Every structure is written in C-alpha cells, then in structure tokens.
Image: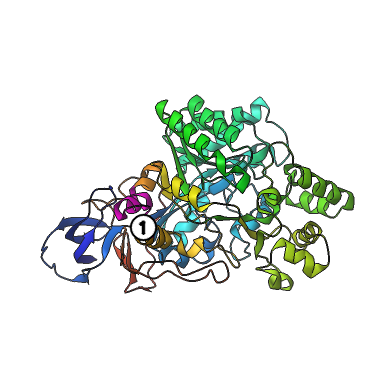
Amino acid sequence: MRVLIQGATIIDGSNRPSYQGDILIEDERIREIGVGLPVAEECEIIAAKGLVAAPGFIDTHSHSDLKILTEPQVLPKVMQGITTEVLGQDGISMAPLPMKYIEDWRKNLAGLDGISDDISWEYETTERYLNMIEEVVPGVNEAYLIPHGNIRMEAMGLDNRQPTSQEMKKMCEILRRELEAGGIGLSSGLIYIPCAYSRTQELIELCKVVAEYQGVFVVHQRSEADDIIPSMKEIIQIGRKSGVNIHFSHFKVCGKKNWDKLDQMLALLDKAKEEEINVSFDQYPYTAGSTMLSVILPPWVHAGGAEKLIERLQDEGIRNRIIEEISIGLPGFDNFIDFAGTDGIFITSTVTEQNQELIGLSLEELGKRKGKHPLQATFDLLVEENNAVGMVNFNGSEEVLKRLMKREEMNACTDGLLAGKPHPRVYGAYARILGKYVREEGALTLEEAVYKLTYKAAKAMNMKERGLIKEGYYADLTLFDPETILDQGDYVNPIQHPVGIEYVLINGNLVVKNGVHTGARSGKVLRR
C-alpha cells in the first residue's frame, strides 16, 4: 500500500522545529520525506494542509491486557492517535500464569483489566499470551513488560513472606524465560499484591537480570503520598545497584498535605541524573487517579489472594480492625482514604448487573445509599463483586501536574482502565495535552509535547525505529488539527472520543480517515 501525505506541518518527534513537507509511505515504512514529492501509482493521497503530521503516539502505561483479546480494535486509544501501547503494568498482568492460580489471579486482575470468559486462560507463558494477541490481529502495536507479581506467584505463590535463596533463583530464571519471549522489561506495583510483599534486595536481583537485556524497570512505587521521598530513594537505589533503566509509572504526589514534597522529589531526580542513573517517568494530564477499589485495604488483607481477601471481609471483627487501621494509618501503607477521602473516591466499574446502578457514586454516597458506614458499604460491595470493582480518586494539583509535565524525564501515558464508566484519560489524555496544555495554556510548545508523546516514550521503552518521522522508520503517524484538537470526556460522561484527530496510520495502513475508524487492524506485537 502507498500513501502520500501532502503539505503537512511535520513535527517529527525529535523536538526540532516544525517544517512543511510531504511524506511518502510504502507498505509498512516511511520511504521518503520532502517537498513536492511525485504521486506514485496506486497511491492514496492525504491533503494535509493545516494538519500536523506527527509520529503515532505511544502509551507507555496501558491496561488493555485483556481487552486486546476481546475487543482488538482498541478504539479508545486509536481514536486519540495512539499507535503503540505498553502492557504488563503494575506488576500484575496476564502472563506468566500457572494453571493452578488461574481463578484466583483473574479475581486479582479484575479491578484493573476487567473480566472475561470469552478467552482461554490456559496459556501459561508470555510467549503463548503474545501469540494470542498476534492471532487476533491487534488494532495497535503492543509491547509487554514482564510483571513482577506474576513471576513471584509462579515461583512462590501469593503468601506474604520473603523468598528463599532457591525461590529467588527461580524468579530470576522465570524472568529470563519471559524476557527471551519478547518482554521489554520488568514492571512492579509495590502497592499491589503480591509485589507489595517484596523487599528492596529482591527487586535489585531481578533488575540485574533486566539490565543484562538492556530492558527497563517500570514501577508503581510503594508510596505516592506521605512516604514518597523514601519510596523514590528505594527505586533510585535499585537503579544504582542493578544498573537498570528506571521508569516511574504515573509520577505524581497525592494529597494536599503532600504537595509541598515536590521540590524534594525533583531534587532526587536531579541527583540521579548527576549520578548518571537513567530515570524517566510517565504522566497522565489529570489531577484524579484510577485503579482497583481494593487498594484502600491494608496489604495484609490481600495475603493469599482474592479468595482470602473476600473471606476476611466477611468477618466483622476483621472489618472493624481494617476501619481502625485506615483511620489511624499504617507505616508504609498508601492510605487512599486519607489522601482522597470517602467523598473523593468514586466507583467506576462493577461486574454484576445488580450493582451497575452504583457506578458514579462516591464511597460517601454509597454509604448513604446503603444506610451504613461508607467503609462497611464498600466492604459489602467488594464481597458482592468478588473484588472486581474499579474506582477514580481525586488527589492531585494542577500546579504539581504542570511542573512535572515540563520535566525532561516526562513522557505521556493514559494509565487507562477500560471497564465500566472509566476515567476520562482512557479516551482523551493525548488530545488533552495538545489542546488544553499546549494550545490553551502554553505549558508546552507543540514540538515539546509531540516529543513527549512519541520519541521520548520510545526511548524510555527502548523501542527501535518508532517514535520519529524519519525515512526507513515504521509508518506509525497521527495527523491532527492543532486549532481544534481537544478531549471531550469528563468524569460524568467519559466515554467520548476527542475532536481534531483526522488520520491515524499504523504500520502504513490507514486506521482512521477523516476522523472515522476504517475498521482496519494492523498492529504488531513488538518483542524485545
């Protein structure tokens, strides 16, 4: 297939100034860039005057891990110009998955990735999982991080304990096997089970393996709130001791009482740079976050897996202990109720039909609806839904967000959970950066923003021949109108595609044309 893009404003992803030109695409690659390029035979013409031609956007923190198998077009991403996403986030994802843990692990994942009986869960390894993605023909390119929690589960189960020397060796062997299958690095979510049970040395040993493969360690750190400074120091120490490239997931600081920690956070980033420790981070352009509702529970409640969690929540004595610990706080526990409040946490997804009417309520409103203490009503909901509940929590600051956005370490992400009534970032994060933060507020130049949406992300994930408009590179491109691009969704009506995205090409194929999806799916699995 040939496509000729004529008269575009080319912003090539390198952070250099824009220029006018044409782009000729043949098959999967960019063949030529110039001015007045001749029209080749059997060539589709895109008249791009007034449009910016940018590299396809790269989402370095995605939760399409299950949806890519059941709804492979991934329309929420494609329609905002995303052509590549990185799965396997937060240390808990689809693979590896030993057969004996399937049912419990599905419940553990449900609040992040949803739940489905429409696929076979008996794939066991990353190799087979990635093959399944290839078989459905994904709508975007998919890369995969090997999840720490899955490795730990295969090596030593879901218990709250430290690995023996033999188990540590086994974890490293599993990680090597999965990196050889194509994983681009390791992820961990140190507030999620079983990752939260690990100590620093365990992560250092695993990251030594990742460093051998020139991979990246992508991490949801232990604290994004009260303990964010020691939390950051731990992650930077892992980079220092292992030599791995560090990438902080959805970097932020939660809770008004913690916003003044930002200067200390930035000083730690500066010090890491001075030490030549390679550190990057991604960010979504909203002051509210989103994750599984069960993160409000102290880590010990999760020990042994989702079935044990549900059992504990059915014990009145344990419930009272949980409420007390949430009230007074625990060392090392990121307390979402403390920094967001029951009035700042909203239900976004449930599985059962009977509880669909609760979507959109805050935990405070849930308690009033049920005539109970908000946390008691929340525990009931988690039991009824077998832990498969998503939430949005309001905890951030626009000032902090913009200061982080300007940092050289930053690239964009969605961190989008696709189930239920999602956070608006699922549909609008990239258009929001280009519309609100570039055109309306001038927080970034257009060239800076495109760089952070494309080549900066590709470099952070060590992706080759993507992220730039460059001859010989893969033809992943997004064409948008810089005067109109803007997100449309909000927290009340989040399921809305943005305006201003006119064309999207993935591996040389037109996937969006004149703002309408063509039905094409031309993504690839991007193995290491």
Q: Position of residue 141 (x, y in %)?
A: 40, 56
Residue 240 placement, left or right of 299: left
| Residue sitting at x 29%, y 61% | 508
| Residue sitting at x 46%, y 34% | 269
Given the image, on which type of amino acid does mark 1 rest?
A: Val
Pointer 1: residues within 10 angstroms few (<14), some, or many (20+)?
some
Note whether residue 398 is visible.
yes
Q: Position of residue 496 (x, y in %)?
A: 48, 71
Secondary structure beneath dot 1 equals helix
Q: Position of residue 105 (x, y in %)?
A: 67, 51
Q: Position of residue 20 (x, y in %)?
A: 17, 60
Is residue 62 in the magenta section? Answer: no
Note whether residue 73 is visible.
no
Is residue 446 in the magenta section? Answer: yes
Give the residue number, with chain letter if any, for mark 1. Answer: 438
Note whether 312 is above or below 78 in the view shown: above
Residue 337 placement, left or right of 425: right
Q: Quadrant of the N terminus?
A: bottom left
| Residue sitting at x 64%, y 40% | 226
Q: Quadrant of the C terminus?
A: top left
Q: Nearer the viewer, residue 310 or 222?
A: 222
The range drawn in magenta is 441-455
Note whether 159 is above or below 469 in the view shown: above
Q: State whether the magenta stretch is mostly helix, strand or loop.
A: helix
Residue 59, located in which quarter of the rendered image? bottom left
Q: Nearer the viewer, residue 122 or 41?
A: 41
